[in-house]
Amino acid sequence: FMPAITRSIHVDIRYVLWIMQYVDGAGHLIAEMQNQ
């Protein structure tokens, strides 16, 4: 682990799902994930 070169992004999964459904128009991907 090298903190000087390691980056992470922390987001709430609800925000990611909202972005996918309403901003990107990727509701079909969400539906596909729910079927599994």
Image (spheres, rainbow, N blue to C red):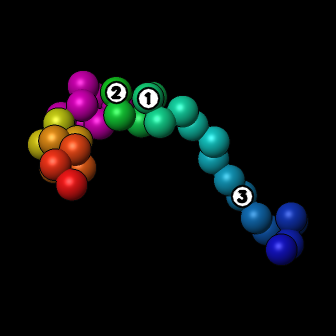
Query: In the image, 8: left or right of 28?
Result: right
Query: In the image, 31: left or right of 8?
Result: left
Can residue 29 be seen from the camera position used here? no
* Residue 31 lies in quadrant: top left
Tell me the kind of residue under disc 3: Arg
Kindly identify which residue carries mark 2.
18
* Residue 11 lies in quadrant: top right
Q: How crowded is mark 3: few (under 14 residues within 10 Å), some or many (20 or more)?
A: few
12 vs 19, nearest the viewer: 12
What segment carries the magenta color?
19-25
Q: Which residue lies furthest to the left in this view?
A: 28
Kindly identify which residue carries mark 3.
7
Tag 1 secondary structure: helix
Position of the C terminus, as image quadrant, is bottom left
Look at 87% across and 65% down and name the residue there.
Answer: 4
Tell which tag, 1 or 2, sits nearer the viewer.
Answer: 1
Dots 1 and 2: beta carbons under 8 Å? yes
Kindly identify which residue carries mark 1.
14
Q: Residues within 10 Å of mark 1 (few under 14, many from 20)?
A: few
